[in-house]
């Protein structure tokens, strides 16, 4: 559906006699973001769709048929961050408890939503939520943008969310993304002890046409911060912890080792 939406947007733009840059200027967006939407790699935010609809005079179609409208809405506190995530040219994630959403496998996402959601989600609602999370990951289909760095507390890898098989697959997925040079990943070792990011997750986002932001999430809450001085503090804190993390080569070796251990546990469970 995302690709069909993008194709239709391109057709409407061309029918209006506009280039991608001209449409971007009129809708107050970047040309790159327009290109990603037309290629089916990104989903416009509701506000972006509203501006595109106004410029192209499509009678609300770009809003009403925006991919994701038929899915379970994300948590209200994440809506603004989701829109920004789709537009970012660079994303740097720090994960304290769970693998970041755009890097999750289907099995891992289902386990997170099954075990950590409260109030609990019904199976049908959870299926829709998993699909929404996998839709977010489509931003990684583009080989170069956004640039993604994942800084993972070792506890993220050690906590057996969904069981050994799910964790083994999830970690192998991360390793594959690194090996394919789609993301960078660094592990903050448990042996480091305390560090300045251990109080919460944080997502730092940069854009081509607007100032950077930081998104911080806790239990049932999440906040997008755009005040420059505070965003710089988040960035400095991230850089500080990144300096204490394992180099990527050692991080990969650790991830492979942990995935192998999970594989052994899974085989042992099946033979016992």
Image (cartoon, rainbow, N blue to C red):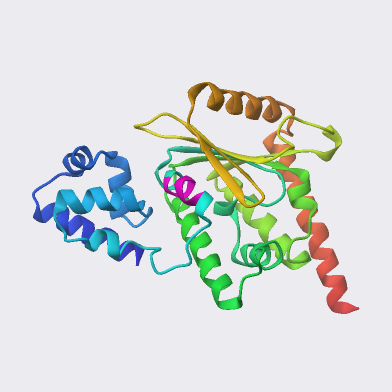
Residue 200, above or below 164: above
The residue lying at 74 percent from left, 37 percent from top is 198
x and y, in percent, of residue 272 in the image: 91, 78
x and y, in percent, of residue 60 in the image: 22, 61
Q: Is residue 245 left or right of residue 6?
A: right
Residue 72, above or below 220: below
Q: Which residues are magenta?
A: 78-83
Q: Main secondary structure of the magenta part?
A: helix
x and y, in percent, of residue 138 in the image: 45, 56
The residue lying at 39 percent from left, 43 percent from top is 87
The residue lying at 63 percent from left, 67 percent from top is 110
Q: Quadrant of residue 215?
A: top right
Residue 234, above or below 6: above
Q: Check residue 243 for magenta coloring.
A: no
Question: Which quarter of the rendered picture does the N terminus lie within?
Answer: bottom left
In this view of the protein, which residue sits in the foreground, 123 or 110?
123
Q: Residue furthest right?
A: 272
Q: Is residue 78 left or right of residue 31?
A: right
In this view of the protein, which residue sits in the foreground, 36 or 123?
123
In this view of the protein, which residue sits in the foreground, 213 or 3?
213
Q: How many labels, in total?
A: 0
Q: Check residue 81 for magenta coloring.
A: yes
x and y, in percent, of residue 95 in the image: 67, 44
Q: Quadrant of residue 25?
A: top left
The residue lying at 20 percent from left, 39 percent from top is 21
Residue 104, above or below 130: above
């Amino acid at each position: 559906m995302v690709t069909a939406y993008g194709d239709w947007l391109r057709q409407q733009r061309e029918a209006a006699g506009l280039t991608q840059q001209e449409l971007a200027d009129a809708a107050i967006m970047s040309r790159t973001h327009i290109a990603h939407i037309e290629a089916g790699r990104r989903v416009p935010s509701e506000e972006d769709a509203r501006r595109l609809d106004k410029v192209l005079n499509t009678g609300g179609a770009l809003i009403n048929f925006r991919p994701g409208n038929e899915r379970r809405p994300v948590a209200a506190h994440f809506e603004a961050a989701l829109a920004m995530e789709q537009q970012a040219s660079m994303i740097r994630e720090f994960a304290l408890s769970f693998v970041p959403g755009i890097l999750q496998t289907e099995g891992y996402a289902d386990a997170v939503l099954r075990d950590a959601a409260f109030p609990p989600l019904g199976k049908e609602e959870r299926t829709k939520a998993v699909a929404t999370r996998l839709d977010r990951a489509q931003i990684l289909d583009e080989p170069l943008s956004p640039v993604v760095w994942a800084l993972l507390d070792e506890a993220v890898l050690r906590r057996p969310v969904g069981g050994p098989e799910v964790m083994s697959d999830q970690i192998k997925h991360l390793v594959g993304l690194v090996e394919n040079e789609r993301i960078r990943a660094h592990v903050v070792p448990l042996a480091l002890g305390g560090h300045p990011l251990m109080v919460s997750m944080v997502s730092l986002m940069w854009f081509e046409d607007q100032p950077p932001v930081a998104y911080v999430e806790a239990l049932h809450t999440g906040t997008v911060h755009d005040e420059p001085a505070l965003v710089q503090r988040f960035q400095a804190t991230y850089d500080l912890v990144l300096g204490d993390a394992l180099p990527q080569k050692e991080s990969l070796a650790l991830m492979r080792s942990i995935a192998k251990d999970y594989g052994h546990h899974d085989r042992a469970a099946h033979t016992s």
